Structure formats: structure tokens, C-alpha cells
Image (cartoon, rainbow, N blue to C red):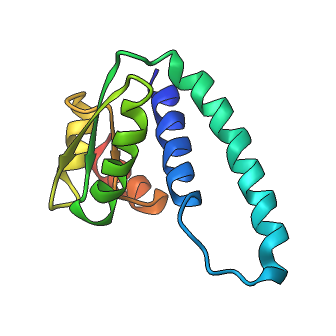
Amino acid sequence: MKKLISATLAATLALSLAACGSSASTSEAAPAESTASSAAESAAESTAETSELAGTTLKVAASPTPHAEILNVAKEVLAEQGIDLQVVEFSDYVQPNLVTESGEVDANYFQHTPYLDSFNEENGT
């Protein structure tokens, strides 16, 4: 279930970032169109996966900026698919991992893999 949640959040975040505007010149338009096509295909796959989660509430721990800001955009997209995303903000980098480990939240969004690996090694998580 957590893998499905993570995949759904990742796809939603990717789509929200892909939707950001670009000031590309005309000569760069073809690759952008190809990227848009790939994003549309990913959106169709993501919608199929997220339909299984309709009616679900997901709690995600995040740092306020930029992670919680990004998740709040994803929250709107997920709401359209019947998923309630609750963003819990933390101002430090220890608590999000602890509340994720304890099961108080479903996931967290604030760190890169080397930090997570180091945290897990130091804390036995």
C-alpha cells in the first residue's frame, strides 16, 4: 500500500512540475511537445492507479518550503480523484522520519536518499 501511495504522490508531483510553464524558443518546442505527450501518458496511468485509492486519506509529513507548498498543489489534484491529502509540516529534519516510522503519517517528503540512508543507519530504522 505504501508503495502505491508513494508512486501516486510521485506521479502527481511529476505532473504538477511538468505543468509549469516554459519560455522555450520555437526551436525547442518539439522536445517540449514530446515531454507533454509523455506526461499525458503518465497521467492516464496515474489516474488508473489512483482510482483504487478514491476515498482514502493520506497523511504526509513535509518541510514547509518547498515540499509542503508542492504537496498543497498535489492536494488539489488528488482531491479531484477522491483522495484526501493531509500535509503535516515540520520545521526540523528528524521528526518527519520518526512519525513516518511510527505510522502516524503514511509518508514524508523533504529529504534525499543519502540523508535517509544515514538517518536509518544511525537510528536503526
Name the residue: 35% across, 15% down.
55
Seen in the image, is 29 located left or right of residue 49? right
Residue 106 sits in quarter: top left
Relative to the observer, which residue lies in front, 102 or 43?
43
Rendered location of residue 61, percent (x, y)? 25, 45
Relative to the observer, which residue lies in front, 74 or 33?
33
Q: How many marks?
A: 0
Rendered location of residue 124, percent (x, y)? 31, 42
Name the residue: 17% across, 61% down.
92
Residue 53 in the image: above or below residue 46: above
Name the residue: 39% across, 54% down.
116
Name the residue: 58% across, 24% down.
49
Seen in the image, is 118 located left or right of residue 35? left
Rendered location of residue 35, percent (x, y)? 75, 58
Residue 70 sits in quarter: bottom left
Rendered location of residue 82, percent (x, y)? 39, 22
Seen in the image, is 120 located left or right of residue 97? right
Relative to the observer, which residue lies in front, 26 or 44?
26
Seen in the image, is 43 located left or right of residue 70? right
Quadrant location, the C terminus:
top left
> What is the residue that sits farthest to the front in this orientation?
26
Residue 21 in the image: above or below residue 119: below
Relative to the observer, which residue lies in front, 28 or 7?
28
